[in-house]
Image: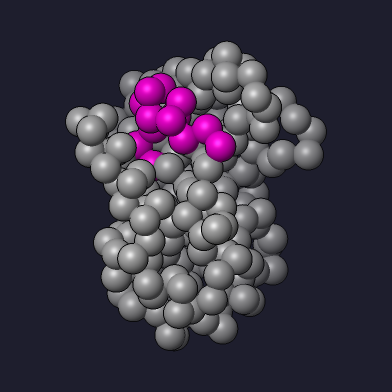
Amino acid sequence: MNKAFNKIVQEINDSGREILLLAVTKNVDANTTNEIIKDGARAIGENRVEVFADKEASLLPVEKHFIGRIQSRKIKKIVKLFDVIQSLASIKHLRKINNEAISQDKDIRVLLQFNISGETQKDGFDPRDTAQIILDIKEFTGVRIIGLMGMATDTADTEIIRKQFRLLRRTCDEFSLVYPDMTELSMGMSNDYRIAIEEGASMLRLGSILFDD
């Protein structure tokens, strides 16, 4: 039994909100992944397509989220292997995913990744471009765009983290005025998930806190 997983599930239950705990299993093998699925994990997150393809056949039934940097040449395989793509950071890739989903007749859900920290090493749309992006995504009907994803700065300053999560929430609110189904907020990782819960996250992406002893 994964004690950390069960502890965080209890924290989520205590919050009184519906929040998906995404177990980030990119650094663990199929057996360890299956153990946390048995413990109750409803969704897992992976970021390496080839590595995941090798272990996917050994996994118990679970919802599969791609959370890594998208490369054009791997989009066909990403669409085939995953149920949700959380790291969509360009209109070019959205167009290719949309076309591939239609080609494969695959129901794919997508979250738009926003760079809420402003760090140049992180992918993501610029929140200042929200109005244009709202217009740009209208043409894509082969995918379901369900919300936004973002990563806060890795810092001990909780006010910086809180401010960035609030930015993502406000940005999501802007989208949901035009697209009522865009309500998911994927934010919060092992070091800042409690703040994310307080700021309205509907999905948490947790890895090291679950698997590092």
Asked if residue 25 can be seen in this view, the reply is yes
Q: Residue shown at 60%/66% (left/top)? A: 27
Residue drawn at the location 31% of the way across and 52% of the way down: 6
Q: Quadrant location of the C terminus?
A: bottom right
Compared with 3, 127 (above or below) is above
Q: Residue at x 46, y 35 (%)?
A: 193
- How many numbered dots are placed on residues in this image? 0
The answer to whether residue 13 is left or right of residue 135 is left
- Give the left or right position of residue 150, taking residue 12 as reference: right
Left or right for 131, reference 90: left
Relative to 166, residue 103 above or below: below
Which residues are the magenta region?
Answer: 191-203
Percent coordinates x, y for residue 101 in the rendering: 45, 64
Q: In which quarter of the view is residue 38 placed? A: bottom left
Instruction: From the top left corner, tell me how far across and down residue 128 is, in percent.
Output: 62, 19
In front: 124, or 134? 124
**Quick check: 53 left or right of 118?**
left
Magenta region includes residue 202? yes
Determine which quarter of the picture holds residue 13: top left
- Work out which quarter of the rendered image holds the N terminus and state it: bottom left
Question: How far across and how far down the image is residue 77, in percent?
Answer: 56, 73
Question: Within the image, what quadrant is residue 14 found in?
Answer: top left
Q: Residue at 40% x, 79% y: name it.
A: 59
Task: Reply above or below: 211 against 167.
Answer: below
